[in-house]
Amino acid sequence: MANFLLEVGTEELPASFVAGAISQWRERIPASLAENSLEAASIQVYGTPRRLAVLITGLPMQQPDKEEEIKGPPAQAAFKDGQPTPAALGFAKKQGVDVASFEVRPTEKGDFIFVKKLTSGRPISEIFTELVPQWIFNLEGKRLMRWGNGDMRFSRPIRWLVTLLDDVVLPIVLENGADVVKSDRISRGHRVLHPANLTIPTATSYVDVLRDGYVVVDAEERTDTITQQVQAAVQSLGGTTEIYPDLLAEVIHLVEYPSAVVGKFEPKFLELPTEVITTVMVTHQRYFPVFKGDNSQELLPNFITVSNGNPAKASIIADGNARVIRARLADGEYFYQKDLEKPLESLLSKLEKVTFQEDLGSVRLKVDRIGENAGLICSQLNLGEVETQQSLRAALLCKADLVSQMVYEFPELQGVMGEKYAAKSGEDTAVAKAIFEHYLPRNADDDLPATLTGQIIALADKLDTLTSIFGLGLIPKGSSDPFALRRAANAIVNITWSGNLAINLLQLLSQISQNFAQAYSKDAATLTNHLKDFFLQRVRTLLQDERKIDYDLVNAVLGENDREYAERALEDLLDVRNRAVYLQQIRNDGTLEKIYETVNRSTRLAAQGNLDTQQLQPTDVVKTVLFQKTSEQTFYDALINLLPQTEAAKRSRDYQQLVTALENAAPTVSSFFDGADSVLVMDANPDIKANRLNLLGLLRNHARVLADFGCIVKNL
């Protein structure tokens, strides 16, 4: 068995490209080998700022031989008077076989010529010579560049190439105009700690040779090393830190030989909000902050940076990093003090000069729309005067910090500084907190707003964004969603569910669409319908993907092309969630199976009648004088017993009593269909037939209070 090493040496690569390249090679190289009928014992992909590498072990020396059966021309066309025709001779030549090897076999379309062709496997040295350039130049990334006078494109200039098949260099040449890179066994060590070249004797010695050159090529090993060193460093300071996943993911691809360095800054900067300091450290300087205590957000005047330099020069490295962060913190201190000179409300006028969207005007106009939306939500929730005023005040101030000096310099702090400045300006605590929370969730892993005022402003803001962008016709298509409208809609549904907010989303969409249409001369009905369809899809996705509800049960509560169910879902998001969760529960415990056949059989037959699906009162549509058998009266009595359970379920959204009543009615309905006293529903007498269909329609309608059972798959 053979082992193969490829190393592509470059100028310093962006961390994001290294991470992406490792991921792409891990997926593509195994697929590439499989396409060439090659199997490997292991495939290890490595990456550092100056190199990408793959080590493939346990390879065969060549592809396996392949025997193919190839269909040729019809026998009638291949031979004439017992002699091969030009068609036969051409086929034989193309396949590299003799006419004598032809086999004539019958097929559905007549007799055809077949040949068996043995193709010898190619040596892997030949195959890899073709594959390596493909692996390199098929890598995708942002801002690929050209260099020199050639057309070669890569993230950074390629400076060396190692290709070893066991201990033999596989000759490969990358030509980039006058700049030619030839493969060799010569790699390069750490730029500072081992600037000399490294000679790699065999493919499998790669990791150890590079380690001797102070290069840790395995990203997972660097991750462990960085984590351990950072934790040890903060413990030596008597503090703690948070290993931010995004920061760690970036740092591991910025260093080849990591060493944690402790730095410090002046304690006076600790008077800044913690979020300002951590943003400077984490986002802008890629440092790990040091906190006091396990759960405290109070900082120590220290930081941990992960150096790619000489550990013996740690103090010099720390001083250099301290100078940089000192300047950034001094900027933050200046911005913070200048912003606090005036109350937050004073910044509102500046929002008139900030554009929200070209066709939608300024952020100040958006703030007004958010306020209108917040008022509608407060009205739906029947809030008192205090909570309503808090919500309207938070809506007015929620974007004010966008024009503060701090947020202008550090956009990541929008909302964060709004809360700080609101509190310093004497605003109510609920108002200040809502300014921060209305941006939540910022990403998929973020928390949702926890306070009622924060939930209201988050809904109001996101509803405005959705309505406004939809109103311009910029509806997301495919994977394109530049305004993150799917995320906004998901957030609206999840905030409603998490806060158990009794809002009528359908009514809100209609009212907000009308307001937008009047202001911007758009069609309100079309806009509302587009938003309804969009939200229904988000509810469907959230129920299936996040709540793990079976797809058919989701269809049962949302309806398939059933506007009645669709509108009911948007009118009461809490109810549609509760019904879906409850359906999944009774499927799991076996209760659904007990009532499924009863309800579904009735539903199928009831479709042949014309009873309105909203009808629940038997006395209005069933004539007892038309009963011919006892089973009809028993069925009717069961419906009378179902009625209070249905009404209770509609009021309380507690469907247990309804399902229990349906379960109790199942034997009665079964006897109606199949018992000794069963009836023929489709009676020749149209009045009797209609009466019996109405009985079934009423049972269907009672069940529809919970779900459309026609959408449920019996044995899913």
Image (cartoon, grey):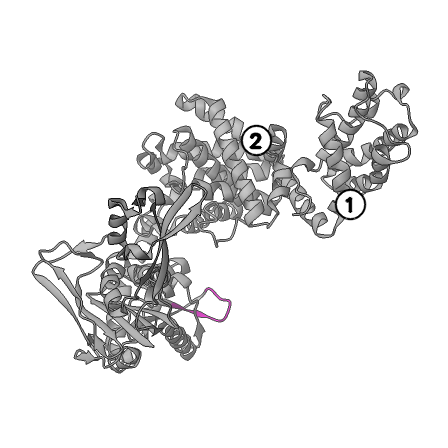
Q: Residue at x 27, y 45 (%)?
A: 87
Which mark, residue 594?
1
Outermost residue on the top side: it is 686
Outermost residue on the left side: it is 178
Q: Residue at x 59, y 49 (%)?
A: 547
Q: Find the magenta span and give its range.
A: 289-297
Q: Residue at x 25, y 64 (%)?
A: 132
Alpha-carbon span between mark 1 and mark 2: 34 Å
Q: Amino acid at mark 2?
A: Leu
> Quick check: 67 left or right of 123?
right
The front one of 536 and 681 is: 681
- Tag 2 or tag 1, which sits nearer the N-term? 2
Local SS, label 2 = helix
Tag 1 near tag 2, CB within 8 Å:
no
User: Does the magenta portion include 291?
Assistant: yes
At which x and y percent is residue 366? 41, 34
User: Does the magenta portion include 72?
Assistant: no
The front one of 413 and 470 is: 470
> Quick check: 557 left or right of 523?
right
Q: Residues within 10 Å of mark 2 (few under 14, many from 20)?
A: many
Q: Which residue is mark 2?
A: 506
Q: Residues within 10 Å of mark 1 (few under 14, many from 20)?
A: some
Q: Quadrant of the N terminus?
A: bottom left
Q: Amino acid at mark 1?
A: Lys
